[in-house]
Image (cartoon, rainbow, N blue to C red):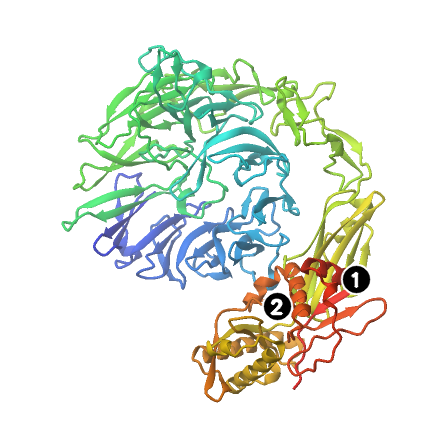
């Protein structure tokens, strides 16, 4: 079945005004218009095919006309329409459940449906675009789990995990301790990646098999500026890393299985940027041959192409062809390849690869330019009529929520956009073919283009065209079909049955056709190709169906095959084994059977040094051996001692993943198990489970403790909650589920974790702000107030009391629930705190929060209308305004966010500064109430609020020489220090 969605774009109106849906059930011979089935007035915008059941189709209506989805369960034979109340931007289908869909809206909300779009439920708001993922089967416990990155503030986000239909606050899990950078969450295969930037320097974290996050370790002086995940195939991470001294290039790093320890594979990869600003990396995997990759590298300002047969452990220059298409010698010198030749590679069967090249010959210098640009894996055998600057793995790699992966065996579809060019209704057709092919890019501009092919997995190449062509592989590579890529119309195509040695020309159209695209159903028995195009800009669009089954006269028999030995420059052991492939003899006109097996035999080889890559901290020397880097101490590395009594000590080598060599009698490369030596704890980290540095009174706070290095089984952990309560664990494993604690009073608490064993100790501290929930607004005044502001505490107290009374009179809110504090300096500003009713119980917290929100809205309205005023003098009346959300050092506990919550993330810095100002200016800050407790049970020191007297003890200014020293002296000398909202007295 083929479905075609066409749209008519009116340039005068700047909108799509019409759409039509066409359906063919005979591989494009005839088409039926389905507008009556979807509604004659319905304007369609997008078409999606369920990847797990091609009979299920979903289409979106144009949101400018109506909000609705149209659903079909019979490959578009019938549709049912369902209205929705949100504008869908993209869809993500579940990898296994055909009825489960995630929908992302234009207002950054994520919805889920479990009945193929008939009903939708909100999952989460403030979701970052493209940063939501379904569960990975076999890894996540529940198949309906959703991984989400939600935006908290500018540049900050949270990693949230929940079930698609049960994602209320109480059902959400925050698996990463703290905030992450926006647009950094990647969930792919066994891995979850994220990034955290502090002080301008990024750190990268990975979770393997859904275990706790660990920081990714690159060589010490790599100092990455940027990182992109290229691939996670075969339980290994390929990453493109821009190091501190790189600008336009990236380096390729390869990890161990957990994705934690990375080693350098290839420096200075060529990169570019796509139309949307996405990074394009010239690094490509050859499907079907284990461990074979190609890459473009910048060498002395020239681009050179490299190939590896052992998964990036060693690289060699791509061998140049001996002759051109006419058989003339090219006289290429391998070591002198430059960047004047651009190549595009395509896959043919398992042993033939097609090259697409831009080249210049320097016969005098005996230099041939031959540089690869990109590889296109033609799994779906569908190609746009344009070349590309990179078949890149867009990074970070992710499941595409667009319809781009919806073209498979049962249902084929494409979209055609009709554009009105003038008032005479002449249309230009732009085909948007959705497939599994990643090949969109810019066209090659040079006229010196050539195409090359290899039939021995990259060991040798030959030229097949001296112009740019689009090539499709028919019947698993038994034939190739080529069409000239040109702006002019064409009528001929070329067929080769012998791996490009000979090409036969055939006419596919009576008149020259502008080819806009080609549609082909991959890995099927129908052998149909459909060309889409137009004869002229004024003609109707044309669909030309070609059945190429006639190229093959019969099914292949045993005598139609030949064997071929995979090798790397005649070295038969590739990735630890000798492999013999079976392929069709070139020129045989027979069709492959569906169960055709390409690998004829495989035999393991004995391991050599080149079956191993250098381990983390080790580098390959010119003699082929791995030696420790200058910064690395191999005797101090014990990666696994944090959780066991012994560890595998590296010999400097780690086996290339998916390498199948077998080790001989003497095992000289594999790591050796050794007992763990006692080591002091290092890198102790303390955080809250959600990364927050604030909580409300009576709430349950969960602390998490991490130890980067040390013998955790023999290291005791002590946690001092800062309120006089301490708890000790015999080892770190007992804290895996977090440590829970409830604070009963408000204040700022210094929470300290200590780790200690016989070899040493380490500690980590955070400051936690426990508050009541409240609302706050920042106030400003008429300019006249500044002229009468003496900037002394007593005057600020009086003005605060007057403003509080005025606010109470306007709103009817009791003054006991209001707190007004003026800040020192000019211009005159103040902060209004709206407190909950002191008689409200903790059981009615939600209703109290709603009441505070309502009161806050009343004040916002009154302040914006200038209704809050007071008389300063007989002829001076001051109007109070609202400026913005506060930045005061108080936080809101949950959904009622204010500017105060933002600043509390910097509590560690500002609390010292605030205390310094308290004593330096002796000002009465109404919301500060400091209690101290030491071994002598001192009376609490109270800094007065509005209405309190000034008879209190003061700490001498000399005791606080600097904010930082003040913080250290004050908090280290006391077992508890709290700042809380104080009650008001008249």
Q: Quadrant of the N terminus?
A: top left
Residue at 46% x, 21% y is: 351
Q: SS class of the residue under badge 2? A: loop
Given contact means CB atoms under 8 Å apart, are the residues at marks 2 and 1 in contact? Answer: no
Q: Say which quarter of the image contains residue 759.
A: top right
Alpha-carbon span between mark 2 and mark 1: 24 Å
Asked whether, in this view, residue 366 is left or right of residue 14, the answer is: right
Q: Nearer the viewer, mark 2 or mark 1?
A: 1
Q: Residues within 10 Å of mark 1 (few under 14, many from 20)?
A: few
Q: Quadrant of the C terminus?
A: bottom right
Asked whether, in this view, residue 235 is left or right of residue 543, the answer is: right
Residue at 40% x, 56% y is: 88
The residue singled out by tag 2 in the image is: 890
Answer above or below: position of 40 versus 230.
Answer: below
The residue lying toward the viewer, choosing from 454 and 313, is 313
Asked whether, in this view, residue 710 is left or right of residue 132, the answer is: right
Labels 2 and 1: the sequence-earlier one: 2
The residue singled out by tag 1 in the image is: 973
The residue lying toward the viewer, choosing from 157 and 798, is 798
The residue lying toward the viewer, choosing from 370 and 344, is 370
Answer above or below: position of 875 versus 60.
Answer: below
Residue 57 placed where, x, y %? 39, 50
> Is residue 715 something one can see in this rendering?
yes
> Is residue 116 something one can see in this rendering?
no
Q: SS class of the residue under badge 1? A: loop
* Rendered image: mark on residue 317: none
Residue 393 placed where, x, y %? 47, 37
Residue at 49% x, 56% y is: 127
Residue 722 placed where, x, y %? 76, 63
Count of numbered circles on the image: 2
Answer above or below: position of 867 versus 52.
Answer: below
Residue 953 placed where, x, y %? 76, 75
């Amino acid at each position: 079945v083929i479905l075609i969605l066409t749209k008519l774009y009116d340039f005068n109106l700047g909108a799509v005004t019409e759409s039509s849906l066409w359906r063919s059930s005979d591989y494009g011979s005839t088409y039926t218009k389905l507008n009556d089935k979807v509604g004659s007035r319905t304007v369609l915008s997008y078409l999606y095919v369920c990847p797990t059941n091609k009979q299920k189709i979903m289409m979106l209506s144009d949101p400018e006309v109506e909000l609705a989805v149209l659903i079909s369960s019979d490959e578009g034979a019938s549709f049912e329409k369902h209205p929705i109340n949100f504008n869908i931007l993209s869809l993500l289908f579940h990898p296994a459940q055909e009825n489960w869909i995630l929908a992302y809206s234009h207002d950054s909300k994520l919805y889920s449906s479990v009945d193929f779009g008939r009903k939708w439920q909100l999952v989460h708001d403030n979701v970052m675009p493209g940063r939501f993922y379904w569960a990975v089967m076999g890894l996540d416990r529940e198949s309906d789990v959703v991984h989400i990155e939600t935006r908290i503030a500018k540049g900050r986000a949270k990693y949230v995990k929940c079930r698609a239909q049960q994602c209320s606050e109480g059902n959400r899990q925050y698996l990463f301790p703290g905030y992450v950078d926006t647009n950094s969450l990647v969930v792919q295969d066994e891995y979850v990646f994220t990034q955290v930037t502090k002080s301008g320097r990024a750190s990268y974290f990975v979770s393997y098999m859904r275990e706790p996050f660990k920081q990714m370790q690159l060589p010490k002086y790599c100092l990455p500026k940027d990182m992109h995940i290229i691939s996670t195939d075969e339980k290994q991470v390929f990453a493109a890393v821009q190091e501190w001294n790189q600008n336009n290039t990236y380096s390729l790093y390869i990890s161990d299985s957990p994705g934690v320890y990375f080693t350098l594979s290839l420096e200075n990869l060529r990169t570019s940027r796509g139309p949307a600003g996405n990074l394009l990396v010239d690094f490509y995997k050859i499907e079907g041959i284990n461990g074979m990759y190609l890459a473009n590298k910048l060498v002395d300002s020239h681009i050179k192409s490299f190939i590896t047969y052992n998964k990036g452990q060693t690289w060699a220059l791509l061998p140049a062809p001996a002759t051109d298409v006419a058989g003339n010698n090219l006289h290429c010198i391998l070591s002198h390849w430059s960047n004047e030749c651009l190549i595009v590679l395509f896959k043919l069967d398992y042993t033939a690869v097609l090259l697409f090249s831009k080249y210049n010959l320097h016969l005098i210098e005996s230099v041939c330019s031959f540089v690869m640009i990109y590889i296109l894996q033609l799994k779906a055998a569908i190609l746009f009529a344009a070349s590309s600057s990179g078949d890149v793995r867009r990074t970070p790699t992710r499941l595409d929520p667009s319809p781009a992966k919806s073209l498979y065996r049962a249902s084929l579809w494409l979209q055609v956009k009709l554009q009105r060019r003038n008032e005479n209704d002449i249309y230009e057709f732009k085909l948007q073919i959705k497939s599994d092919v990643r090949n969109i890019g810019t066209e090659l501009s040079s006229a010196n283009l050539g195409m090359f092919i290899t039939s021995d997995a990259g060991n040798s190449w030959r030229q097949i065209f001296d112009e740019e062509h689009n090539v499709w592989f028919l019947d698993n590579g038994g034939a190739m079909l080529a069409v000239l890529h040109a702006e002019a119309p064409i009528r001929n195509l070329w067929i080769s049955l012998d791996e490009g040695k000979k090409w036969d020309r055939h006419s596919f159209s009576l008149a020259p056709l502008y080819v806009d695209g080609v549609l082909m159903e991959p890995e099927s028995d129908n052998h149909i190709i459909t060309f889409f195009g137009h004869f002229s800009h004024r003609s109707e669009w044309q669909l030309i169906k070609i059945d190429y089954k006639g190229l093959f006269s019969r099914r292949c028999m045993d005598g139609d095959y030949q064997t071929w030995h995979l090798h790397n420059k005649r070295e038969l052991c590739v990735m630890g084994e000798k492999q013999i492939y079976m392929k069709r003899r070139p020129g045989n006109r027979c069709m492959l059977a569906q169960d055709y097996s390409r690998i004829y035999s495989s035999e393991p080889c004995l391991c050599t040094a080149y079956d191993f890559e250098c381990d983390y901290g080790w580098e390959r020397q010119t003699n082929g051996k791995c030696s420790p880097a200058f910064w690395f101490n191999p005797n101090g590395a014990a990666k696994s001692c944090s959780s066991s009594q012994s560890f595998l000590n590296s010999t400097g080598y780690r086996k290339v993943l998916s390498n199948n060599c077998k080790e001989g009698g003497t095992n000289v490369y594999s790591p050796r198990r050794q007992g763990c030596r006692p080591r002091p704890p290092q890198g102790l980290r303390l955080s809250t489970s959600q990364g927050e540095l604030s909580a409300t009174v009576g709430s349950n706070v969960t602390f998490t403790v991490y130890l980067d290095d040390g013998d955790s089984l023999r290291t005791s952990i002590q946690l001092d909650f800062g309120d006089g309560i301490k708890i000790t664990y015999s080892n770190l494993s007992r804290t895996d589920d977090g440590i829970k604690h409830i604070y009963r009073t408000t204040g700022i608490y210094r929470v300290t974790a200590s780790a200690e064993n016989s070899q040493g100790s380490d500690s980590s501290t955070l400051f936690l702000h426990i508050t009541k929930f409240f609302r706050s607004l920042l106030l400003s005044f008429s300019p006249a107030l500044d002229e009468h502001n003496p900037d002394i505490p007593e005057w600020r107290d009086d003005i605060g009391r007057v403003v509080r009374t005025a606010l109470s009179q306007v709103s009817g809110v009791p003054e006991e629930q209001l707190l007004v504090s003026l800040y020192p300096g000019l211009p005159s500003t103040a902060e209004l705190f709206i407190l909950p009713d002191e008689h409200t119980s903790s059981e009615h917290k939600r209703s109290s929060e709603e009441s505070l929100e309502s009161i806050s809205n009343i004040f916002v309205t009154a302040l914006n209308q200038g209704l809050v005023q007071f008389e300063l003098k007989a002829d001076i009346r001051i109007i109070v305004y609202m400026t913005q959300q506060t930045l005061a050092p108080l936080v809101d506990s949950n959904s009622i966010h204010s500017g105060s919550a933002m600043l509390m993330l910097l509590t560690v810095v500002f609390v010292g500064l605030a205390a310094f100002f308290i004593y330096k200016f002796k000002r009465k800050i109404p919301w500060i109430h400091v209690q101290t407790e030491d071994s002598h049970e001192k009376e609490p020191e109270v800094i007065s609020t509005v209405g309190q007297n000034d008879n209190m003890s003061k700490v001498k200014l000399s005791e606080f020489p600097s904010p930082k020293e003040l913080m250290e002296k004050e908090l280290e000398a006391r077992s508890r220090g709290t700042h809380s909202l104080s009650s008001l007295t008249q």
